[in-house]
Image (spheres, helix red, strand yellow):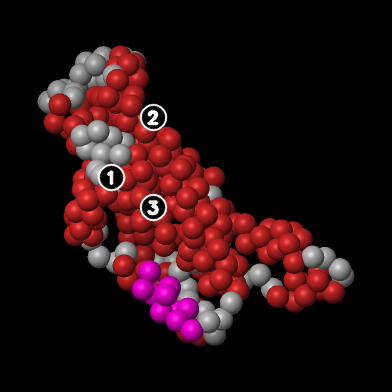
C-alpha cells in the first residue's frame, strides 16, 4: 500500500503533469500540424513567406482537382480497385482464417508466422521480382495486375485478425445450439460469424486502407497506364501547385480518417491487437 501511495504521489506531482502536457502538445503538433497545414493551403489563393496570413481564400483548387481528367481518373481508380481488392481478399483469406482459428493441424503456427515474416521487410524487392513475372504474363499496366499487387498487402490483415476473432468464439455456445437442433450452417451464421464480425470488420477496414494507400507496387506495375491516388501524388508534387497537392492529400486522407473513426470502438477495444496474437 505504501509503494502504491508513493507511485501515486510521483505521477501526480506538478513536474510530471507538466511533462505529460508538454508531451501531448508535441504529439498533437506533429500529428495534427501537417493536417492543419494541408487544410489551410487547400483554400488559400497564395501564402508566401514572410506573410503571417494568406493573400486570400478560394475554392478554385478543389474545382481544379475535380475538373482535371488525370486526377479524376486516379480518384476513380482508387475507389473502384480498393473495394475489389478487399472483396477478393475476403474470398481467399476468410476460409483460411476460419481454419487457422477453429482447427488444429500440423504447421498452423508456422503458416501464420511465415505470413507475418513475409510482410516484415521492404517489399520493393518482391515487387521487382513480380514485375519480371508480370512481363511474361502480360499483366504490366493492367487492372488485374494492380489488384494482385495490392492483394498481397491485405492478406496478413484479412487472415490474422479474423483468425483471432474466430478463435475467441466459445465452443460451448456452438455445441449448445447444435444440441438444440440447429444445423451447422445456422450455428455458423447466427453464432460463430456474428461473434467474429467485429474482428472481421476491423480486418476489412485495415485491408481497405492497405490497398487504398499502396503506392510502390501499384506504381511499378501500373504506370503509365493506371494511376491511383497514392501514385498520382508523385506527379502532383512535381507538376502541380502546392494548393492542388494539398487538396488531393486531404481527399486521400479522408477515407482513412473516416474508416478509422467508424472502426474506432473495435480497434480501441482490442480487436486489432488480439488479431496479431498466436494462441
Labels 3, 1: front one: 1
Q: CA distance from mark 3 to mark 1?
A: 15 Å
Where does residue 160 sit, x and y in percent of width and height? Answer: 47, 66
Where does residue 237 sit, x and y in percent of width and height? Answer: 18, 32
Labels 1, 2: front one: 1
Count of numbered circles on the image: 3
Query: Pointer 1: residues within 10 angstroms few (<14), some, or many (20+)?
Result: some
Residue 87 vs residue 254, the one in the foreground: 87
**Element on which disc 3 rests:** helix
Which residue lies under the disc numbered 2?
76
From the viewer's perspective, is residue 59 above or below residue 100? above
Where does residue 191 sit, x and y in percent of width and height? Answer: 73, 63
Which residue lies under the disc numbered 1?
139
Q: Residue 151: which numbered mark, if any?
A: 3
Precedes in sequence: disc 2 or disc 3: 2
Residue 110 counted in the magenta span? yes
Q: Which residue is painted at 47% across and 78% down in the image? A: 108
The segment highlighted magenta reads 106-115
From the viewer's perspective, is residue 276 above or below residue 56? below
Precedes in sequence: disc 3 or disc 1: 1
**Element on which disc 2 rests:** helix
On screen, residue 26 versus residue 275, left or right, reads left
Q: Which residue is painted at 54% across and 60% down in the image? A: 94
Amino acid at each position: 500500500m505504501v509503494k502504491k501511495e508513493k507511485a501515486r504521489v510521483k505521477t501526480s506531482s506538478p513536474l510530471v503533469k507538466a511533462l505529460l502536457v508538454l508531451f501531448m502538445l508535441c504529439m498533437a503538433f506533429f500529428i495534427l500540424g501537417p493536417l492543419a497545414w494541408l487544410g489551410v493551403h487547400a483554400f488559400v489563393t497564395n501564402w508566401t513567406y514572410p506573410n503571417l496570413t494568406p493573400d486570400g481564400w478560394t475554392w478554385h483548387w478543389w474545382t481544379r482537382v475535380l475538373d482535371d481528367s488525370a486526377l479524376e481518373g486516379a480518384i476513380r481508380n482508387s475507389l473502384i480497385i480498393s473495394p475489389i481488392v478487399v472483396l477478393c481478399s475476403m474470398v481467399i483469406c476468410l476460409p483460411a482464417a476460419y481454419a487457422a482459428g477453429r482447427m488444429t493441424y500440423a504447421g498452423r503456427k508456422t503458416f501464420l508466422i511465415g505470413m507475418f515474416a513475409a510482410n516484415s521487410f521492404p517489399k520493393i524487392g518482391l515487387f521487382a521480382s513480380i514485375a519480371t513475372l508480370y512481363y511474361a504474363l502480360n499483366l504490366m499496366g493492367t487492372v488485374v495486375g494492380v489488384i494482385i499487387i495490392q492483394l498481397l498487402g491485405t492478406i496478413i490483415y484479412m487472415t490474422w485478425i479474423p483468425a483471432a476473432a474466430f478463435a475467441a468464439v466459445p465452443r460451448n455456445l456452438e455445441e449448445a445450439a447444435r444440441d438444440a437442433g440447429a444445423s451447422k450452417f445456422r450455428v455458423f451464421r447466427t453464432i460463430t460469424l456474428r461473434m467474429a464480425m467485429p474482428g472481421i470488420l476491423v480486418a476489412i477496414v485495415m485491408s481497405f486502407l492497405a490497398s487504398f494507400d499502396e503506392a510502390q507496387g501499384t506504381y511499378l506495375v501500373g504506370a503509365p497506364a493506371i494511376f491511383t491516388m497514392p501514385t498520382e501524388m508523385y506527379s502532383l508534387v512535381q507538376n502541380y501547385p502546392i494548393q492542388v497537392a494539398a487538396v488531393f492529400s486531404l481527399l486521400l486522407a479522408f477515407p482513412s480518417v473516416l474508416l478509422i473513426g467508424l472502426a474506432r470502438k473495435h480497434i480501441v477495444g482490442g480487436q486489432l491487437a488480439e488479431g496479431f496474437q498466436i494462441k
